[in-house]
Amino acid sequence: MKLRLETAAMDAVTVRLFDTIDESNMAWIIAADQTLRDTLGEALIDLIPSYTTLLVHYDSQQLTFGQVATLIRSALRHLRPSESQNGQLHEIPVWYDESVGPELPLVAKRAGLSVDSLIERHCDRDYCVFALGFAPGYGFMGLVDEGIATPRLKTPRRKVAAGSVGIADRQTAIYPLLSPGGWNILGRTAVPLFEFAKRGDPLFRPGDKVRFKAIGQAEFEASGGDTTPMEERP
Amino acid sequence: MSQARLTVKQAGPLALIQDLGRFGVGHLGVTQGGAADWISFRWANWLLGNAPDSAALEIVMGGNLSLVANAEVRLALTGADLGATIDGQPLATNTSFLLRCGQTLIFSQPRRGLRAYLAFPGGLDAPTILGSRACTAREQIGGLRDDGRPLQTGDQLTWQGSSSSERSLPEGVAPAMPEKSCQLSMVLGSQASHFAGRSLYNAFNQPWTVDNRADRMGIRLTGQPLHCTLGGVISEGIPLGAVQIPPDGQPIILMNDRQTIGGYPRLGALTPMACALLAQCVPGTEVRLSPVSASQAQIAYRKQLSHWH
């Protein structure tokens, strides 16, 4: 961990702790998140943690740039990694099927695997939640087994259904709501990520772990899943 | 109790309920939203004596948005001149006015600026989601039905207060709408050092053209491309006004409905005042970027806010 403060905007500072993506960053990022919330209090407008940084949006009516920089430096000088770094483990049931996961065959073929083995590979590890962003409740997770890593689609879809589970390079994620997107979609979950986020209480937080579990269509439907096929093909 | 007092007889292309925005939720992946020209928005509320964060309408383009009053009401109009009329009679901007029962208020097309703000006594009624009434289409959050949709034909608008005393804008405070060109202040970010000297020179010494690929998420500028030596960066939080440089070298200014994190290099960020001005630039407007320090920008910002204290 090496602390650097960078000007991001008139009233925003990027707090940079690392230069590369690593799961072990998260214990530091979570600790810094909590410390900065406590230190800045009312002067904090927004705090957005990500893989290697935290963006601090502060109230420039209360603090100057120099003041906020001094506060951040002294608050983080003795930072120790959070001990709750592993966060919670969430098991997410996914219906992997070509109708709702149109890239299943493509990703499998690229990896030289059968569709069933691809699904096994996607389910065989716990993914770390690195950051929330892109859409309410959207968690960037990784790292995906190198053998099934697949680059983004050349042309993003205009509409990716809510609950779609996708991979892009070595990352995996769930689309909380209908949105455009360029990830390779493998399946769909009925877990209502958007509703959690909208209540201000997201299911995942940075540092949490997520494990996918393959379920059949009947179980997916029984848990309220929408089986409408993904219409648009890339 | 509120009652229906204004009916949307015809919805234009884009009229959104907005307030100052949704704050303290960036870590959920929820965007800021809020009035893009927040200065005009605040003046509209000020004209009616409303609290600064009261929900108002952000009317983009006009496009024959027609509103019919079901009771007499005092409203305030600021921002762009969208050729507004009441029963065919031209209506001035930057003023409050009475709309009488049965009268129709129509917004036709932009004459100067792009976004008009229409304030209502005490603020429009709409569900408060995560502390704000801001309507964000992309996130399906906010608006009359909390689905992120703009005003629809047949919608009924209600508000929270009664018509208040008349106020007029002090001389010279109304933000000037950009015409053919304008200057946008920008705070240089730390990644600026990764741009070649020639590109840094070009960034500040050429006119940029506001592209028609522009919405509440981001506004593209076109001109001589800028080159950054960073291929991409690891996704990180993005502030309002961030000047993002994708691989084609054409800047995208990230506005109120931007994604909360992103991975393109950034030259810096426009000041909030410059964002308000850019939000009023129609495609084709020439803009020049002008560097300011964060502390200079903060002084200008405080001065702007002091109008409403």
Image: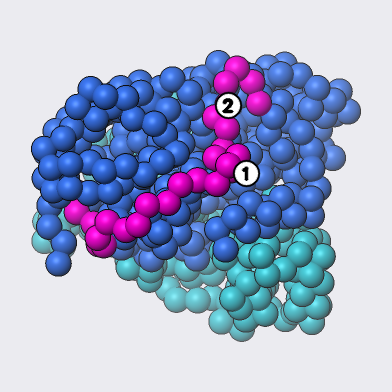
Q: Judge by depth and name the residue closer to the eye, B190 or B179.
A: B179
Query: What x and y, as percent, mark residue B41?
Result: 45, 47
Residue shown at the point (52%, 51%) measured from the top left = B260
Query: What x and y, as percent, mark residue B103?
Result: 16, 35
Q: Quadrant of the N terminus of chain A?
A: bottom right
Q: Residues within 10 Å of mark 2 (few under 14, many from 20)?
A: many
| Mark 1 vs 2: CB contact within 8 A | no
Which chain does the cyan colour mark?
A
Residue that carries the numbered disc 1 in the rendered image: B273
Residue shown at the point (14%, 67%) measured from the top left = B1
- Whether residue B175 is in magenta: the answer is yes
Please identify the dominant SS of the magenta region: loop
Residue B264 sits in which quadrant?
top right
Residue B96 sits in which quadrant?
top left
Rendered colour, chain B = blue
Query: What x and y, as percent, mark residue B306?
Result: 63, 58
Residue B200 vertical position relative to residue A5 in the rendered view, above or below: above
Residue that carries the numbered disc 2 in the rendered image: B178
Magenta region, residue range: B155-182
Query: What x and y, as percent, mark residue B24?
Result: 50, 65
Give the secondary structure at mark 2: loop
